[in-house]
Structure formats: structure tokens, C-alpha cells
Image (cartoon, rainbow, N blue to C red):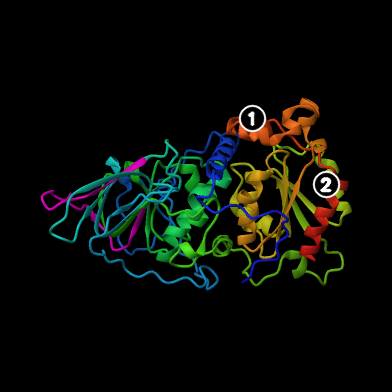
Amino acid sequence: LHGPRDLETSDSSKQEGEGGDQKIELDESSMEAMEEQKQPREDTPETKPASQGTTPANSDLDGKGGTASTTAPDQEESSEAGSGSAPYTKCTPPPNSTVCDLSNSRFDICELCGDARTIGQSSTVMYVPHTETSDGEEWSIRAQSRKNIPWVKKVTVKSLNTSQPAPKCTSKHAMPAIVFALGGLTANVWHDFSDVLVPLFLTARQFDRDVQLLITNNQPWFSKKYMTILSKLTRYDIIDFDSDDQVRCYPHVIVGLRSHGDLGIYPNLSPQNYTMMDFRLFVREAYGLPAAKVAIPYKADRDDPDKKPRIMLIDRGKTRRFINAPYIVQGLEWFGFEVVKVDPKMDTSLDEFARLVDSCDAIMGAHGAGLTNMVFLRSGGVVVHIVPYGIEFMADGFYGKPARDMGLGHVKYGISPEESTLLEKYGWNHTVIKDPETIRSSGWDKVGEVYMTKQDIVLNMTRFGPVLLKAIDFIM
């Protein structure tokens, strides 16, 4: 599959590690995560606690474990998902290799090949080396894709030396396992995908569901919300690592999650050559959405003379709101769209919402987490990205490049000062309006305070029209 023609006029975002964008992006998304927290959550546990016993190796689950255990039902595997990826082969410990790799600026990861033992209640994973001459080592890592977030819970990894006794196994498993953390900036859908689901896909997909997931810093709502995706990555019970009273023995354990960039996969960094296109098709398959060869709805029903291209308008409820939303809907209809206006909430059923997005040819919204739902669009769908005043520098890295990498069109529209409520608040002569770069250079806190949380949008449909025509041309 080839990505669509690029509808962007700006340069692509910088790759991971270039310049200082990473901190700004982290802080920007951290601000969104805090402002979009939705509490309280239903307290139904979605992982299997230690008191429920162990999962026999290589066994499928029947889904009859009650509310204390969420199971991953067996599903038909499609040839679409993971296309072109290399199959997993059993790991063998290479000679003279270190267990943990702390060299990546984004994440730490430990891979234990051979005799690995997890002790959940002490947040420890032990490695019994295959050589008789081995020095004991110990690492403490944050088992998520953002190693610099201080409140992500750490897991201790110990490589025993020959004089140290290994803990006795209370359950033995033939499948590999992955230990990873939730928390961090999750509860914001962009971070749910960028920090956990994409990295988990990168780390777990190679096992073709024959892997067990052990979650530390467990967030029951996360497993409940994304169980459809998690079920496509594992056929076993998901273990609440922190409450697990077992010493589980595995032939292969990975601690941490690999990550290439914000909502991104770089195929040259993946031994399986995964792409963001692979991830989007994987997610679509998990939700039972039409296969990659099925055209966007408008083209699929082109013979219907009354068919209109369908656009989903995401209307944020708190910040960066569309003040003139009814006028925008009228304008979109004037341009020939059927409009589906939504305000997705944290507790929105993803199974239902994914099908709603799939029924659309385009998704439109102000820069914010709701645009992450583009993962449910069909190949050739379009993301219409409204960029609030003063934050154009972060637009492409968060949504533009990910959209193009997933085989979607991306049309970006930067609003003018006249379309921002900041103009009325500050006036033309204020630095906020006349020199956003000065505000940016003063630090993220000010950027977040002014441009991300105090700004709403009054979209000028006349000025916006030529950009919208690009999206229409792409759909047609």
C-alpha cells in the first residue's frame, strides 16, 4: 500500500532526537492530558489478580471468569494485519550481552532470554543467566515508552550471579511475557495510543498473540476501554503485576515498551518492518472494520446519486472550542458534506465510535486528542486539522506526519488572529498576538497557558473554504 499524496505545505516534523521539540511536545500533551481527565471511572478490574490463580501455558480462555477477570477471546486472524512482517522466532540468549538497554533517549527496555522469573508484588523480574560465570547486575526502569515521566512506576530487573539462589517457580509458562506500566499521561486518548498502544504493538505484535501481558501501575479503565485491541495482542489473561503473588517463570520476558516517536513507527527501526499503516489496519481489524481494499464510504457508494461525502466534526467541550459550531456545520453542508457532529468523551464506547468514524470519509477538529480517532478511518480518508493561533510549530508532529504515515490525507488550516478569541482578550498590540515566537521562547508554561487553554475558535468559513476544497478533491 502506498500513502496518499501529501496535502501539506509545511515541512515534515523532526525525527526523534532532533532539536528541542521533544520536551515541548511532552509538555503540550501533558497539559492536554490534565485538562481532559475524566473521573470517576468504573472500578471494575480488567486484569486478573493473583487470587484468581494462574493461566496455564498455551491455553485459550473461555471468557467465563466473571467480573474479576477480563479475558482475551480468540479471534480470526486476517492476512491483512501485520502484512509483510517477519514471524517471531524463539529467542536465544546471545553471549556476553547485557540484559537492559538504557541508551535510548525515549525509553528503557530489558529483554531476558532464557530463564526469567517475575515477582509482581515486589515489582521485580529476575534473570537466571545461562552461563556459570556471570556477575550480578540490577536495573530499575520505568516500564513505559516515556522514561522521563517521574510518576510512572519502576520495575527492578536483576541478573543473578552464580552465588545467588533463584526464587522457586510457583507457575511455569511456555509463552513469552511483557511487563509494562500504565499511568503516566494516559487518560488522554492521544497518549493512550502514542505512549502505550503503538509501543505495545511494536513490542508484542511479533508474538502473534502467544504472549502474556503483565501490567504494573494498573489502570482498570484502560484495559476495559481498549480490551478489543489488547485481545488482538494476547490470547491470555492480563495479569495485574502489582498484586500478583506468584513467581512466574517464562522462557522470555521483555520489561518496558519500545517506542520510535510520538504516535509514530519508523520501519527501519523495527526488525519486523512495522509501519503506522500496519498499526492502523491492525486496529481496524481488531474492531471488525472493513478490510484495507474497501474504499472510503463515498467512493464505495459512488453509484448512489444522493450520496454525499461524510465528515465528522469533533467539537471539543472545554478548550479550543468552536464558538460558531452551528455556522460551521451549515458551511460544511453548503460545501456538500453530510456532517456528523460529535464530542467524544472518555467513557465513549470505542467499539461503537470506531464504527462511526469508519462510516465517515473525513474527520475534522481543532488540534487536540480527539483527532487521534483518525486511526479508525479507511485508507484514503482525510484529516482536516484546524490549528489554533500560536501553536503551528507543533501541528505536524502530532497529527500531520502520523496521518500521512497511516495512509491518510492531512489538510492543515492555521487560523488567523481574527478567528481566535485571544484577539478580543489581548488586542492587536499585545505580544500574544503580534509575536507568538516570543511567547514560545519564554517557555512551555506560557504557551500552554495562553494558546492551549485560553483560546477558542471562531472559524471563518470563507477563508477556510479553499483549504476545505483540498480535502474534497482528495475524497473525490
- Label 1's element? helix
Tell me which label, 1 or 2, sits earlier in the chain. 2
Q: Is residue 248 left or right of residue 298?
A: left
Residue 450 x %, y %: 67, 30
Q: Is residue 454 visible?
A: yes
In the image, residue 35 lies at what x, y percent? 60, 34
**What's under tag 1, amino acid-wise?**
Glu
In the image, the segment drawn in magenta is 154-178
Q: Amino acid at mark 2?
A: Val
Image quadrant in which the C terminus is located: bottom right
In the image, taking residue 66 as reference, residue 20 lies left or right, namely right
The image shows residue 344 at horizontal and vertical percentages of 66, 44
Residue named by callout 1 = 449
Magenta span main SS: loop
Report the residue marked by disc 2. 329
Residue closer to the observer: 343 or 396: 396
For mark 1, does the 10 Å Cα neighbourhood hold few (<14), some (14 to 19), or many (20 or more) residues? Answer: few
Q: Is residue 227 visible?
A: no
The alpha-carbon separation of the residues under discs 1 and 2 comes to: 29 Å
